[in-house]
Image (spheres, rainbow, N blue to C red):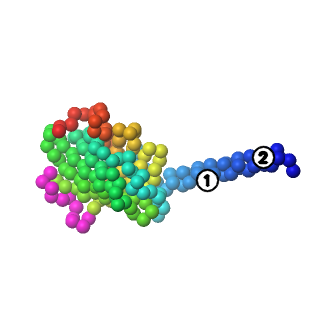
Amino acid sequence: MSRLFVLKNIGVNQMKSSRLLLMVAAIFVALTAAAQEQLTEHTWRPASDSPRAAASVADLAWLEGHWIGEGLGGEAEEIWTAPRDSTMLGLFRLTREAKPVFYEIMSFMPDGESVVLRIKHFNRDLTGWEEKDQTVDFPFIARHEDDYRFRGLTFRRVSADELTIFLALKSKEGTFREERFVFNRKGTAVSAPVAE
């Protein structure tokens, strides 16, 4: 058997393997997309009994830092710590007319083979919205390009210094509307003036 024949067969087998890998990847992406139900233009929830995508808190390390911008008709601010001990901690503040409206304490933490975002809300006087042993949880669903999709919440990495967050808000009637938060990393251009 000639070396040329062997090399040609190896090349053909590698092409077949590459095609097979591409087909498997395409099927996985299609199944992941099918396992999601769209709530608003940019938010999703998992279809019933669908498996969650594997993820770690380290996948969200790009959020570390101080973000300022706008949302909910006011000036929004988020601060995220670096991942440590398998968690990331965050603080959120919303102000209108230079007065605080509400605050959040947030944490990305492991949840089985995936991640969950847990949030506690506080009024401006630090009285809590949730009972002391309750949190609002956003389980990770999947990553799609630069979108990190959680149930009803999407973090979009626009660039190293730009972040957009989409939040599905449910009405009393059971319909959803989308709220958009636009952030820039502190030290870069900000779309709205922020009171310091």
Disc 1 is placed on an element classified as helix
Q: Residues within 10 Å of mark 1 (few under 14, many from 20)?
A: few
Task: Indicate the position of residue 92 as horizontal and vertical percent values.
Answer: 24, 49
Q: Is residue 151 visible?
A: no
At label 2, the amino acid type is: Leu
* On screen, residue 95 above or below 189: below
Farthest front residue in view: 3
Please report whichever mark, 2 or 1, sits nearer to the chain's N-terminal start: 2
At x 79%, y 45%, the residue is: 8
Image quadrant in which the C terminus is located? top left
> Which region of the structure is painted magenta?
124-134
Mark in the foreground, 2 or 1: 2
In front: 8, or 68?
Answer: 8
* Gap in angstroms between the C-alphas marked 2 and 1: 26 Å
Instruction: Indicate which disc residue 24 carries.
Output: 1
Q: Which residue is mark 2?
A: 7
